[in-house]
Structure formats: structure tokens, C-alpha cells
Image (cartoon, rainbow, N blue to C red):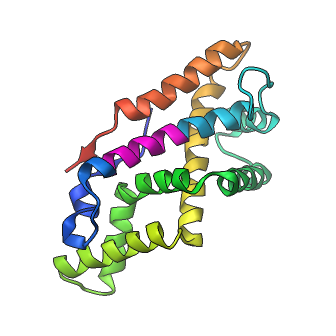
Amino acid sequence: MSHLKLVSPDKMLSIENRLHITNDVNQAMVEFGFIVKGKYLKWMVYGNDVFEAEMDPLFIEICASIARHGKLADDLKLQLNKKIEKYLYDLPTRRRLALAFILFNSEQFELSIAEYNEHLDLNAHELKTLIGKHIEREIYVGGSYNLEIKIRDYLAMELFKFASEFSFISGGIKKERVIELLDIYSRSSLATLGFED
């Protein structure tokens, strides 16, 4: 399974950028974020009651689209984004923040900051301060629309990855096995959690 690649927290979240977030707190928030992601996947597949509900029709359509075409049709993308936006709207702030911490530590975030700096030409210390201000604004001001879109896209990609794997084995599979697969998928995110230097 491919997972979001994380970079060393020292690159993004350290005292150098005036963020008073220890590595332990950062690690805990990222781990919490992966747990939230696991619950989100279960919700997308089975809704609010995993043990009573049937498989979500949208998830079935997504799996069928991937099996047939290797991608999502535009109308399914739109439906998926709307469903994720509803999920995020109803999600407590601390859980949205935990998902944001995954993105703050991601390789993609590091690359976006590097690209941003190409136009500013900041030295290393100035760049650290800029990163700190950016993350602090997201954390303490409650998040921006841009961050919400990034979280939505991240969750959409995670569902796509799970559905891609599931679509190959879905024929006649029992609900207990699907729930087990969801648990394994969620745990594997935590088990492979590591920060690249």
C-alpha cells in the first residue's frame, strides 16, 4: 500500500520557526490524524453504523468506475468531494486539525514551501519563520479555505487508494472481511508511520 510520505518534523515544526510544538506532540497529532482517517474510511464505506448499514452506494460506484476505467468519472468526483466536505463540516475542529498535521509533515507541503520560496529567495532562517507563521495561522486562526481543500483532496486520494485495492477483491466478499480490511488499512498507516530525514 502506498501512503503519504512524511518528512522529518525538524524540517517543518521546530523551535527555529517559533512554533512551540514538540516532536512528541507533533507525532501524537499525526498519529491521531491517521486514526481519524481510518474512521473516515469506515464512514465512507458503511456510513454512521458500520455493523448495521449496507455498503454505501457511492463507494460501490467508485469501485466499479475504478475497475472499469482505472479512474473516477467526473460526476463521481463531484459526489465524492461533496460527501467529504459534509464530513469535514461535521467533524470536530481537533480532528480536522489532526488531519492538517499529516499535511504539515508531508513531503508535498515541504515541496510547496520550496516552490513558494523560489519567488521570495529567503535564507534558511527566514524560510523557517515563514513556515512557522503559515502553520500557526492554520492552527490558531482555525484553518483557511485552502487548507480545507487540501484536506479534502487528501481524503479523496486515500479513499481512491483503498477503493482501488478493494475493487480487485470485492466479488462476494463478506462485510466482516471488509471491516477487517479497513482496520488493516488504518493500522498499516500507523505501523509504517515514520519521518524521512
Q: Residue 13: x, y in percent? A: 28, 62
Q: Residue 119: x, y in percent? A: 33, 86
Q: Residue at x 39, y 59 (%)?
A: 104
Q: Residue at x 60, y 52 (%)?
A: 92
Q: Image height check: is 112 above or below 123?
A: above
Magenta residue span: 26-36
Image-quadrant location for residue 93: bottom right
Image-quadrant location for residue 62: top right
Tell me if residue 124 is in the magenta stretch.
no
User: In the depicted view, which residue is nearer to us: 176 or 28?
Assistant: 28
Q: Report the quarter where the N terminus lies.
A: top left
Q: Image height check: is 68 above or below 53?
A: below
> Could one spot residue 8 in this view of the protein?
no
Q: Residue 169: x, y in percent? A: 63, 19
Q: Residue at x 73, y 20 (%)?
A: 51
Tell me if residue 34 is in the magenta stretch.
yes
Q: Is residue 47 left or right of residue 182?
A: right
Q: Is residue 8 left or right of residue 1?
A: left
